[in-house]
Amino acid sequence: MQGASEAGRTKRTRLTAQQRRETILAAATEVFAASGYRAGKVSDVAARIGVTEPVIFQNFGSKAALFAAVLDRLAGDVRASLDALTGHHESAASLLAHILSPADTAALHEPGAHRTLFGDAAALIADPEAGEAAARVAGVVAGHLADLVRRGQRDGSVRADVNPAAAAWLILSVLSARPLRAAAMADESLEPDVGGLALRAILARPS
């Protein structure tokens, strides 16, 4: 007969190594999105999933390596988001306008939003620990945007003479500098013109 203490035990399902890493990544994404890389603590990540800090380090080695893994996931999320939005826009130009609109750009940088991670990454390019991962993810996201520009060239909504890679970095520069403008630009009404200037440099003129 089963003893009372044994019967009262809750059987815990043991996670596989991959499941454990995914659980840690999900928690780390939330912590870094809310607090940023420098203020985000590994202890907070551990607390979210009920493990100790050594478990985090056993899986990722360091805080910088954990942040790098989060950024790699972010790059994949950007591609998925662009693909999902494509079906809601009649042309690549329409999607580019949506991406650069003040409302959408502001939403990307709201505290706690996952895509605030990208703004944080942009500010960490020179960081000795996280800079390499930040630069890598910026390059990957720029590649996704360049693909979108090429799509626009195929549908005729983007100028044929535009260099897709250069256009992608222009768009990325506008997006990543949004927190700077929000903090320092005295006249917020200028924000639509910033994205508008970038769009006019890229989009084909109506015939």
Image (tube, rainbow, N blue to C red):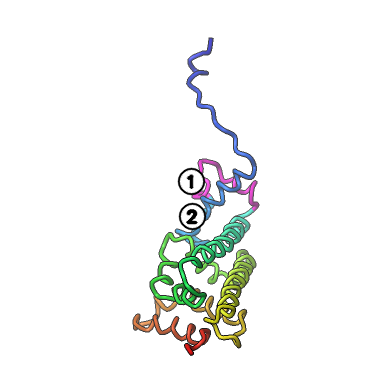
- Position above or below: 102 against 9: below
User: Would you say residue 135 sits in the magenta stretch?
Assistant: no
| Residue interval drawn in magenta | 43-61
Label 2: how many Cα within 10 Å (few below 14, some 14–19, many 20+): many
Residue 152 falls in image quadrant: bottom right
Q: Amino acid at mark 1?
A: Arg
Q: Which residue is mark 2?
A: 31
Q: Which residue is mark 1?
A: 48
For the view shown, which residue lies furthest in the top direction?
Answer: 1
Mark 2 and mark 1 in contact? Answer it, CB < 8 Å. Answer: yes
Q: Nearer the viewer, residue 7 or 100?
A: 100
Residue at image x 61%, y 60%? 72
Q: Amino acid at mark 2?
A: Val
Q: Nearer the viewer, residue 125 or 83?
A: 83
| Secondary structure category for the residue under label 2 | helix
Q: Nearer the viewer, residue 186 or 203?
A: 203
